[in-house]
Image (cartoon, grey):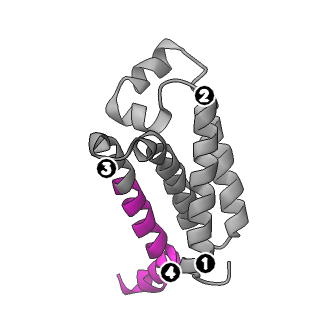
Amino acid sequence: MKAFDPLMQLFFKGRLIYFIAVILTMVAGLASRHFGALLPDFVREHFGDALWAGMIYFGVRMVWINHSRELALVVSLVFSWAVECSQMIQTPGLNEVRSTVLGALILGHGFLVMDLLRYAVGILCVYGIDRYFLRNKKA
C-alpha cells in the first residue's frame, strides 16, 4: 500500500477543495428545490439551475485540476448548454430516463432559453469564487 501513497497524493493534491465545492453546491441546489416554498420567488426560480451549472464547473476543475479555470468555464458552459439543448430531443428512452429522479436532476425535462442564461450566470459566479477565493495552485 505504501507504493501507492505518492500516486494517491499526486492524484488528490488540490482536488479535495473542488470535491468539497461539488458536494456543497449539490446540497445547496437540492435544498433550493426541496425548500423552494420557503425561499423568495427569485431564488426559487433561478438558483437551482445556476447551482447545477456551478456544480458542473467545480466537477470539471476537480477532474482537470492542471488546466486553466478558463477552460473549465468553457467546458462547463458547453456541457450545460448541451444538456439543455438535449431536452429538445424527446425519444421514449430519454424520456424514460428523465422520468426518474436522478435522470430529471441530470437531464432536466424541457428546453428553456432562460436556463441557458441561468447556467451562464451560475458558472460565472463560481468561476469568480474559484479565481478570487479558492486560489489553489497556479492554474
Q: Is residue 72 magenta?
A: no
Which residue lies at the image location 40% right of the left edge and 68% below the top edge? 20
As shown in the figure, which amino acid type bears the numbered disc 1? Tyr
Q: Is residue 24 magenta?
A: yes
Residue labelled with disc 1: 132
Residues under labels 3 and 1: Cα distance?
25 Å
Q: Could you tell me which secondary element the residue under label 2 belongs to?
A: helix
Q: Earlier in the sequence, mark 2 or mark 3?
A: 3
As shown in the figure, which amino acid type bears the numbered disc 3? Ala
Q: Can you say whether 119 is above or below 124 in the image?
A: above
Residue labelled with disc 3: 31
Q: Can you say whether 137 is above or below 17 in the image?
A: below
Instruction: Assess disc 1: are there few (<14), some (14-19) or many (≥20) residues with their C-alpha within 10 Å of its C-alpha.
Output: few
Q: Position of residue 30 (x, y in %)?
A: 34, 47
Q: Earlier in the sequence, mark 1 or mark 4?
A: 4
| Residue 64 in view here | no
As shown in the figure, which amino acid type bears the numbered disc 4? Lys
Q: Earlier in the sequence, mark 4 or mark 2?
A: 4
Residue labelled with disc 2: 86
Q: Which mark is residue 13?
A: 4
Residues under labels 1 and 4: Cα distance?
19 Å
Front label number (2 vs 3) = 3
Q: Position of residue 19 (x, y in %)?
A: 43, 67
As shown in the figure, which amino acid type bears the numbered disc 2? Ser
Residues under labels 4 and 3: Cα distance?
29 Å
| Residue 103 in view here | yes
Front label number (4 vs 2) = 2
* Corner quadrant of residue 8: bottom left
Q: Earlier in the sequence, mark 4 or mark 3?
A: 4
